[in-house]
Image (spheres, rainbow, N blue to C red):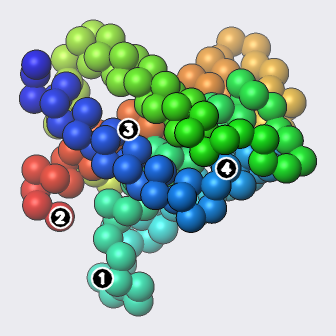
Amino acid sequence: MTDTTKQFQEIIARCKRLFEAKMGDYGPAWRILRTSSLTDQIYIKANRIRTLQMKDLRKIDEGIDQEFIGIVNYAAMAINQLRLGVVDRPDLEPNKATELHAAVLQEAFELMERKNHDYDEAWRRMRISSLTDIILMKLLRVKQIEDNQGNTQVSEGLDANFFDIINYAVFALILLSEIGE
């Protein structure tokens, strides 16, 4: 197992643990959110990361790692909403929601392995601030696709962008762990 594989799986396990804990607190309340609402939640987290990266003073004592974990989990929820459709009231048992969440994160891992091979781990030479900016750019793309009712002419769809967002957030968490933040 390569370091990236091991590191990625460790980060995903951390994200899953938080998702499971929140399922215990809130249940699958997220099922009522439209995909655009999840996009906005991810945007809020990514924008906070960028703001913290650009400012010296923090008024809330939470690191950016928690925000990146939130991005991973919200993006996985968005993919599940795309697949399942939005409902008026939660319709999944917590165990089923956790299972679906884990399956999306496994798909993200498999995608990362394929792309990482072809890109030769270029992300390792990137700055965390660049990963943040790429996530924000992908969110702007997602918003545009959502505004176009999901239609694209030549670009990948919503799910591909959410998978990329998951992977860039995990890469940022790996890099953060390596520098000890």
CA gap between label 4 and label 3 equals: 25 Å
**Image point 32% across, 11% down: which residue?**
114
CA gap between label 1 and label 4 equals: 37 Å
Residue 53 image position (x, y, % from top left): 34, 67
Residue position for label 3: 168
Q: In the rendered structure, which disc, 1 or 3, sits on the residue that comes first in sequence?
A: 1
Kind of residue indicated by mark 2: Glu
CA gap between label 2 and label 4 equals: 31 Å
SS assignment at label 4: loop
| Mark 1 residue crowding within 10 angstroms, few (<14) / some (14–19) / many (20+) | few
Kind of residue indicated by mark 3: Tyr
Identity of the residue furthest to the right in this view: 88
Mark nearer the viewer, 1 or 4: 4
| Mark 4 residue crowding within 10 angstroms, few (<14) / some (14–19) / many (20+) | many
Contact? badges 2 and 4 (CB < 8 Å)? no
Residue 143 image position (x, y, % from top left): 72, 42
Residue position for label 1: 56
SS assignment at label 3: helix
Q: Depth check: 2 or 17 in front?
A: 17
Examine the image and state in which quarter residue 112 appears: top left
CA gap between label 1 and label 2 equals: 15 Å
